[in-house]
Amino acid sequence: HKEQREFLKKSAESDRISHAYLFCGQEKLGKKTIALEWISLLFGRDLQKASHPDLIFLEPTEPPSVKDSKEKPTGKKEIRISQIRELIWKLSLKPYSAPFKAVIIDQAHLMNPEAQTSLLKTLEEPKGKTFLILITEMPERLFPTIRSRVENIKFYPVKKEEIKNYLKKQGILEEDSEEICKLSQGRPGVAVDFVSNPQKVNLFREKIRELDSVSDSDAAVRFQYAKNLSQNLETMK
């Protein structure tokens, strides 16, 4: 993502930082990694493995129990209005030691309508030294009014050779490297997952063998297999 990195670097060097960005593109492309790298540059310290009092990270959470929340339970992970309200309160405070307060909202498309409405007010009236990065693979699920108030940065699949070079540096054999490249389909995050957890490659190989055998089965067997596969996809991420 050289172009995206260069654009963000120049924005920092020229002190032309927008109050909000939308990093969009397929999942596992490295959008969150780039966001952390850029904030690290602005803060003057590595944030890849460290937290910082001026960095606020927001992501979907499990629904609260009926007893613990006044919000209507939905039974699925989402970003709720209570999280956005807490975020707004944190943004009202001055930076602790960094030049900015930075926010990363991961899987921003999972903000429910109430949360999006609440965030919109902050985007319309940005506070002092703060900026937000919304990360999503489904920008169309965000309100048009939100998308119109952020600077859009698109991310695209990475070239095969770049991923192969990374795998080579990790000591991955040529044959395995070729297979990982095919499975990752230009998504660095998927390749990194395979390197850190080789068992995932074996799981994919097993699924491919299953697909070969199921393809010759009758419609009922294929339908049941598709149903079971969709239910197990989350465990393979």
Image: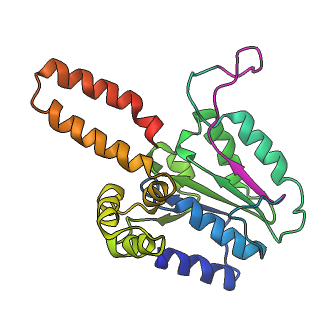
Nearer to me, 216 or 4: 216
Indicate left or right for 42 with 18 as reference. Answer: right
Q: Residue at x 76, y 61 (%)?
A: 50
Please tell me whether the stretch drawn in magenta is mainly helix, strand or loop: loop
Q: Quadrant of residue 214?
A: top left
Q: Residue at x 41, y 60 (%)?
A: 187
Residue 118 higher or lower than 91, as above or below: above
Q: Where residue 73 sits: x, y (%)?
A: 63, 20
Q: Quadrant of residue 74?
A: top right
Residue 62 higher or lower than 41, as above or below: above
Indicate left or right for 127 with 60 as reference. Answer: right
Q: Where residue 100 sits: x, y (%)?
A: 80, 67
Q: Residue at x 69, y 41 (%)?
A: 118
Q: Quadrant of residue 39?
A: bottom right
Q: Is residue 36 magenta?
A: no
Residue 175 higher or lower than 139, as above or below: below
Counting every numbered tag in the picture gives 0
Q: Residue at x 36, y 46 (%)?
A: 202
Segment tinted magenta in the rendering:
53-72
Q: Where residue 157 sits: x, y (%)?
A: 37, 64
